[in-house]
Every structure is written in structure tokens, then in C-alpha cells.
Amino acid sequence: MKHILLGDEAIAQAAIDAGLSGVYAYPGTPSTEITEYIQFHESKTPSGIFCQWATNEKTAMEAALGMTYAGKRALVCMKHVGMNVCADAFVNSAITGVNGGLVVVAADDPSMHSSQNEQDSRFYAKFALIPCFEPSNQQEAYDMTRQAFDLSEKLRVPVLMRVTTRMAHSRAMVETTDAPRQQNSHSLPQNTQHFILLPAFAKRNYADLLAQQPEFIRLSEECGYNTYTRGTNPKRAIVTCGIAHNYMQEAGIAQGASVLKITQYPLPVALVNRMVADGAEEILVAEEGQPVVEELLRGLVPSHVAIRGRLTGDLPRMGELSPDCFMSVEGRESKVESKLLLPGRPPSMCQGCGHRDMYTALNEVAREYNEARIFGDIGCYTLGALSPFYAIHSCVEMGASITMAKGAADAGQYPAFAVIGDSTFTHSGMTGLLDCANCNADVVVLISDNLTTGMTGGQDSAGTGKLERICMALGVPEEHVRTVVPLAKNMEEMKAVIREEVNYHGTSVVIARRECIQTLKRKARK
């Protein structure tokens, strides 16, 4: 069967066809559509696939590992910064190994279209010493995902699937199987000690993982996805990784050069050696993200071979690659004859959004104090940093608002506000609030509760209907857990509540609750 699919959708369909039993994820662009495809295409899925959003990426990774412990196949999906959240469980899963197949999808975001950084998830695969796939097109995304589950069960280790924004969010024709695989039956591991990382057991497991490395490299060299083509002018060579191979083909710059296409890791050393043996004197390395392969090649090839790429400035050090990048390397002009230049339109919060009224009230109260500071967090409310509010003074990563406000308060900052969304709060803000409550830090936490995970499209929020009880359970006094409705007509009430909590000189929480205007519109249409 043939379908036109996003890269994300190709991965999702492949997981279904590979006998998936559970998908675990926290929504994050550009990975969200993988889980949504499985959720909203129930007619295409066999019965019994567990598919609900996890509270964060760490709990998703751990739950998926638990499913594989029971012999089933599990998929974990996240954006690149989510790998930081689940890193402890992810790296250790390579030491415990798996019982059923486990594929971890990391969707990287070069050019930071909706992210705080440009990190490259291939480093995590290298760090954990496990295989990694990086498809160059949507068909490979489908085929590799199915193979990744097979490889995971064969090697009994998790496998990382790395995609980037353009791969995740572009469409192409994908041919899918007519014979989906059945789900695994329930089966527990024979050696239960393998999943107990006491030092004595972990050392033995780690030694086993190290012993597997030559096999991982051999499989990478013989996989069929990594290909080496000797050119008519082998002194010139190009190494392409993942979607960069498509960009090279579109730019049409090969012109007699040898080409090594890499889409499975560890690095296929034998293919690199063949390229050098054929007389390569200059190698251009094209890879989305950071210069992972470029740095590895510098330690592999003889010193007389010139390595060009992001580190040398031949390709841009940051941002996405494109066919134009390759054209500029060759000193040629873009194939695009003209570019339509449109004025930029900065993002802003939706008209009618409850975050707007929350920030209006907070700003008016903050102006009543000298040097009030508002520590922000990750979500659509982060746009409060821009016009017309200019409200927040920091935004670092998920959950940092509360703990940064606490640290500033510990240093004498007054008043110290933290603004966090309901989904971000349950993702990684609760432990920070516990720290505040344990020492009664002089912090006012505003949870802007729009009853959904708004920034990524309106997925369920783990804390809906529970926030007041969670805050009190973490130690915030009941009388200092306040709830307001952020509407213009309630402005004076909101300001009065915030002032009262600033004057409390202890840990307090103000929950500003009003449903996201976008989810409200969708409900109205239905």
C-alpha cells in the first residue's frame, strides 16, 4: 500500500506495522505527530496499543522500558531537549538491555524553530553505545523503524531513531507492508539480575555492552542503508548524513566525487577506509546538527586528507542545511531564481487567551515593587517576554521557573515570581515547588492553567483537575493556594490576590485558570 505521509507519520505507521504494543511520549515539536497519528488512527492500529501522553520524557522512557521488560515492543517519542529529561533512564537502559524491542525517537530542531537550543541527539547514541538510525527520506523512516525494532530485539539493546525538523514535517510517498506483524506475547526476562543495576551486576552488563561494539559497527557497515559510491574523481569525496543526502542530490554538486551516505551508526569505519583507499584527498562532511561525523573523521583519516564541513566554515556552523548551502560551497548561485521576501511577523499569544489577562495583572502588581523579577518557563505563555507585555526575565528549560525563583529568593531577591503552565508544572515543576515548600521560600508561583498542553496543539495535560491538591500535598498551606479566573472583569480581584501572596513572605501558589481559546473553539465546532 502507498500513502503520502509526514516523516513522523511514517515512523508511527512503521511502529504499528512492526507489532507495537505501547507508545510513550510527551508532546514536543517536531515529534508530536508520531503519537497523535497512533492516537487518531485507531482504525489502522491493531487492538491493545497503549497510547496516552506521559507526564514527562523520563516517565515515558521508564514506562517503555517496563513494557519491554514484559516482552512487548515499545516506542518512545520526544523532541531533542526531551532527551535531556530522560537521559538517566535512557543511558542506563543500554546497560540493563531490553527484553522486547525498544525504539527511542528523538526529533531534533536545527535552526531552533520552536526550541531553546540546537543539540544533536546522535551524541546520546554514542554516549550510550547503542545503534542509531538517521533516515534520509520518509521511505527510509518507515523501513528503518521496522528494522530498528527487529535489531533491538536481536541485540537486546534500545535503538535510537534520530530525525530532524524537515524530515519530521515534510511529506512523501511511502510504501507500507500489506502484512503487519503481530504484537509480541507476554514474556518475562530469564535473567532478572540484568535489570538490577547494583554495581556488581552493572559492571557485568557494561562489559557485555562493550563486547557488542564490534558487532554494532559490522552491522552498520553491512546494513544496506550506508552506501559508498566511488566517483570518477575519487580525490573529491562527500559524506552525507541523513536528510543532508537529499540536499546534496537536489543541489547536484556530486559531479564525479565519491559519495558516502551514512544513515546508520556507529560510523561505518570500513566504508570510510574504502573512501580513503580510493584516493580521497578532500572530504566534505554534510550533517544536520553538530559536527559529529566531521570530528570522528578527523581521528580516522590520514592527516593529509582535508576535512571540510561545519567546523571549517564551509557549511554554516548553526541552523538547518539546505541545497543552497551546498551551492555556496561550490561557489554557485542558488537554483531558486527569486525569493519572495515577506515582512516578519513575530509570534504572539492568541486574542482571548487567559495568559494575557494573567500577565496584565502580574505586571501591574510587579510595577508596585522595586526590581521585581518574574522567572518564566516553557510554553505558549513564554511569549509574555515579547510585546506588549515584556513580562518575564528568564526562560531556560522545562520547570526552571520555580527553582530559579527560589534561588533568587534565597539570595535576597524580593519579590520573586515564577510563571509556569499547568502541563509544564506537572512535567518538571512539582519538585521545585517541593523545594520551595520545604524551606518556605519567599516565592509566588503563578500556574497559568489553560487546561491543556497548548503550545503543541492541545494535548491532554496531566494535572487537569488536580493542581490545587498537588500543591497542597507538596506542602503549600491550603490558605496560600489561590485560584483566580483570568478575565478583564476580574482584574482587580487578581491583583489583590497576587498582592496578598507577595506580602505573605512564604511559598504561595496562584492558579490562573481559564481554558485555552483554541481548544474552546474546537469544542464549539464539534
Image (spheres, rainbow, N blue to C red):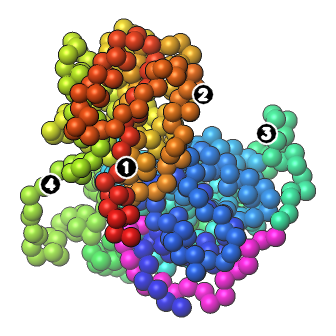
Residue at the limit of the structure toward the top, as seen here: 412
- Residue 59 coordinates in the image, percent (x, y): 62, 46
Residue to which mark 4 is pinned: 345
Crowdedness of circle 2 by 10 Å Cα count: few (<14), some, many (20+)? few
Give whichever of discs 2 and 3 has the lower sequence position.
3
Residue to which mark 3 is pinned: 197
Residue to which mark 1 is pinned: 515
Give whichever of discs 3 and 4 has the lower sequence position.
3
Proximity of marks 4 and 2: CB atoms separated by less than 8 Å: no
Q: Which mark is residue 473?
A: 2
Q: CA distance from mark 1 to mark 3?
A: 44 Å
Q: Is residue 98 left or right of residue 482?
A: right
Q: Is residue 353 above or below residue 233?
A: above
Numbered range of the magenta stretch? 168-185
Indicate the secondary structure of the residue bearing disc 1. Answer: loop
Taking depth in this image into account, of 168 and 57 the one nearest to the observer is 57
Indicate the secondary structure of the residue bearing disc 2. Answer: helix
Mark 1 residue type: Glu
Give whichever of discs 4 and 1 has the lower sequence position.
4
Residue 408 seen by the camera? no
Indicate the secondary structure of the residue bearing disc 3. Answer: loop
Q: CA distance from mark 4 to mark 1?
A: 26 Å
Q: Residue at x 26, y 25 (%)?
A: 495
Q: Nearer the viewer, mark 4 or mark 2?
A: 2
